[in-house]
Image (spheres, rainbow, N blue to C red):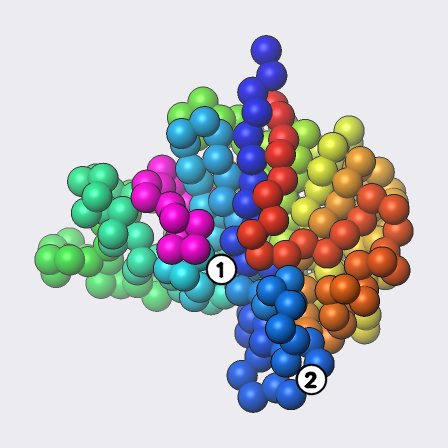
Amino acid sequence: MLIDFKLTILGSGTSQGVPIIGCDCPVCQSTNPKDKRLRTSALLEVGDQKLSIDCGPDFRQQMLRENIKHLDGVLFTHAHNDHIIGLDDVRPFNYRQKKDMPVYATVEVQQALIKRFDYVFETDPYPGAPMVVLKTIENHPFEVEGTPIQPVQYLHGKLSVLGFRIGNLAYLTDMKTISDEEKSKLKNLKTIVINALHYKAHHSHLNLEEALALIEELAPEQAYLTHVSHRMGLYDEVNPTLPAGVELAYDGLVIHGQF
């Protein structure tokens, strides 16, 4: 029996978001909501279970926008600030749920969290500090309360990052290169969400040409491009130019999947 789930794009922008502070370009000045991009993250919902993939600096705003009243855990892809720095804002969930927040991360990401949020991990943290419990994940399949998750490992420049495949959907952000072995985990997808920064070559992100080539190779039914820079252009102008089955993601986009 297949189980339905949904993935909501909480944020589809780069580390600076869109609009960028002080920028007068047409994208940053656009009034189209699809051109306003918070920092990249997503919400996985399986029945009543809710898991955030990353929690960046816009985490609070994203939770409020989606009216999220409980959260069952956070899955971290890697330790860059735009993906982790909202961890302090799990506190309202601690208070409401009266328990620690499970945080699923590699040992390397855990070490970064302990360094940046040292006050959280002290032996005797101050009252009101976020309460989290670290759950170690590696590049092996694991489950979160019955939800099967397949990590997919790739490089963001020289930094190892985990994307996640859940059933027939894969969520991959901050990718530059991926091995053939890891690509083999991405066969027979219905939907892929993958980063595409802009048009020019970048040292740690796929550009549009590279993302489209990988999408063509993997051949999912549908692809959405996330972690999009203002340099990509206006949503209404770029989207019609993309190949069939490829679209720009946008904040609030809901994608359905099954496992």
Front residue of this view, candidates 192 and 244: 244
Residue tagged 2: 25
Residue plotted at (67% across, 64% down): 228
Q: From where the camera sits, is residue 210 visible? A: no
Q: Residues within 10 Å of mark 1 (few under 14, many from 20)?
A: many
Q: Count the numbered circles shown.
A: 2
Q: Position of residue 109 (x, y in %)?
A: 45, 54
Q: Position of residue 234 (x, y in %)?
A: 74, 70
Residue plotted at (43% across, 55% down): 65
Q: From where the camera sits, is residue 233 visible? A: yes
Residue tagged 1: 83
**Badge 2 element:** loop
Q: In the figure, 61 relative to 164: above or below?
A: below
Q: In 3D space, how far apart are the residues under numbered discs 2 and 1 (Cα atoms)?
A: 25 Å
Q: Earlier in the sequence, mark 2 or mark 1?
A: 2
Q: Position of residue 259 (x, y in %)?
A: 60, 23
**Quarter where residue 182 is shown:** top right
Q: Residues within 10 Å of mark 2 (few under 14, many from 20)?
A: few
Q: Which residues are magenta?
A: 63-75
Residue type for callout 1: His
Look at the image and say whether residue 65 sits in the magenta stretch.
yes
Residue plotted at (80% across, 36% down): 221
